[in-house]
Image (spheres, rainbow, N blue to C red):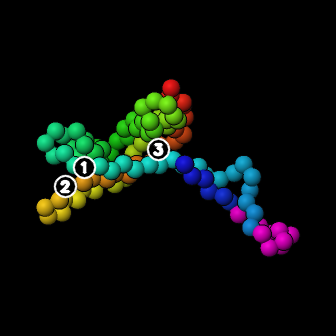
């Protein structure tokens, strides 16, 4: 989660930076990484399709139980694959929520 803090500093601020209370563009983004599995089509292929389609997908970010989850439509901005010689292949992907994600507690 992020929020821009619009500058409101004046000569009367005593040399301290100030920002507008209750203002600023908010956003939410995340990333995922893991071992690439090229055979099952469930991680590398699916993530690549998110980039090819240019469409938002529903992202659920957080634990399956016992914590806070953030859910909402998101666009994937980056999917990368690495396959070093004689090492396991890995993937990573970045996304940004499109609008305000729903925040919920799952027990």
Q: Secondary structure at mark 1?
A: strand
- Label 3 or label 2, whichever lies nearer to me, is 2
Tag 1: Cα neighbours inside 10 Å, few (<14), some, or many (≥20)? some
- Label 3 or label 1, whichever lies nearer to me, is 1
Q: Position of residue 105 (x, y in %)?
A: 54, 30
Image mark for residue 88: 2
Q: Secondary structure at mark 3?
A: strand
Q: Residue furthest top?
A: 107
Label 3, label 1: how many angstroms apart (C-alpha)?
Answer: 24 Å
Q: Are marks 3 and 2 in contact (CB under 8 Å)?
A: no
Label 1, label 2: how many angstroms apart (C-alpha)?
Answer: 7 Å
Report the predominant secondary structure element of the magenta stretch: loop
In the image, taking residue 95 as reference, residue 90 lies left or right, namely left
Q: Position of residue 78 (x, y in %)?
A: 34, 54
**Residue drawn at the location 74% of the way across and 56% of the way down:** 20
The answer to whether residue 14 is magenta is: yes
Residue on which disc 1 sits: 35
Can residue 52 be spotted in the picture?
A: no
Q: Read off the magenta span.
A: 7-16
């Amino acid at each position: 989660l992020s929020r821009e803090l619009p500058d409101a500093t004046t000569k009367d601020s005593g040399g301290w930076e100030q920002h507008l209370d209750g203002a600023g563009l908010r956003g939410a983004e995340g990333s995922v990484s893991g071992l690439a599995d090229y055979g099952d089509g469930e991680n590398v292929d699916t993530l690549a399709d998110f980039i090819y389609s240019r469409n938002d997908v529903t992202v659920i970010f957080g634990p399956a139980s016992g914590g806070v989850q953030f859910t909402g439509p998101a666009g994937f901005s980056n999917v990368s694959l690495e396959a070093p010689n004689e090492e396991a292949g890995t993937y990573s992907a970045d996304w940004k929520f499109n609008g305000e994600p729903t925040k919920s507690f799952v027990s």
